[in-house]
């Protein structure tokens, strides 16, 4: 079972208490965007095995959105951080690099 710790309330929540928000750190396109930009945002995403940055909502807890880094192949969770972050914290990136030397990096 996937367990993520909410960075706001500190609760280690099982995935049944969370709601997925899919990929984090995306440039979101909506009204006023071109058809190509909106299509790329909605449908044209890579989905390789490995480390992903995801959005999650603590639905049955504090209700806040947060971000998490985890490996989709092993379900290893590297950490969570506030949703307002523009990029993953440096210490989280270093933790990932230490465990996954072949990791290509953020973005």
Image: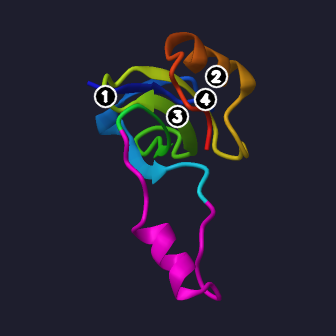
Q: Is residue 38 above or below residue 100?
A: below
Nearest to N terminus: mark 3 or mark 1: 3
How far is the residue under mark 3 from the one under mark 1? 15 Å
How far is the residue under mark 3 from the one under mark 2? 10 Å
Camera-side mark, 4 or 2: 2
Nearest to N terminus: mark 1 or mark 2: 1
Which secondary structure, mark 1? loop
- Look at the image and give the residue range highlighted in magenta: 27-48
Badge 4 density bin: few <14, some 14–19, many ≥20, Cα 10 Å: some
Reading the image, the residue beneath label 4 is 7
How far is the residue under mark 4 from the one under mark 2? 13 Å
Q: Is residue 33 magenta?
A: yes
How far is the residue under mark 1 from the one under mark 4? 23 Å
Label 1–label 4 contact, CB within 8 A: no
Q: Is residue 107 magenta?
A: no
Reading the image, the residue beneath label 2 is 92
How far is the residue under mark 4 from the one under mark 3? 10 Å
Reading the image, the residue beneath label 3 is 68
């Amino acid at each position: 079972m996937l367990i993520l710790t909410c960075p706001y309330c500190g609760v280690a929540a099982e995935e049944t208490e969370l709601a997925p928000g899919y990929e984090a750190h995306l440039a979101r396109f909506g009204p006023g965007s071109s058809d190509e930009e909106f299509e790329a945002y909605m449908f044209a995403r890579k989905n390789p095995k490995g480390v992903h940055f995801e959005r999650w909502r603590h639905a049955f807890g504090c209700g806040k959105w947060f971000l998490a880094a985890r490996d989709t192949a092993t379900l290893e969770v590297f950490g969570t951080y506030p949703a307002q972050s523009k990029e993953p914290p440096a210490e989280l990136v270093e933790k990932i690099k230490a465990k996954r030397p072949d990791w290509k990096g953020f973005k």
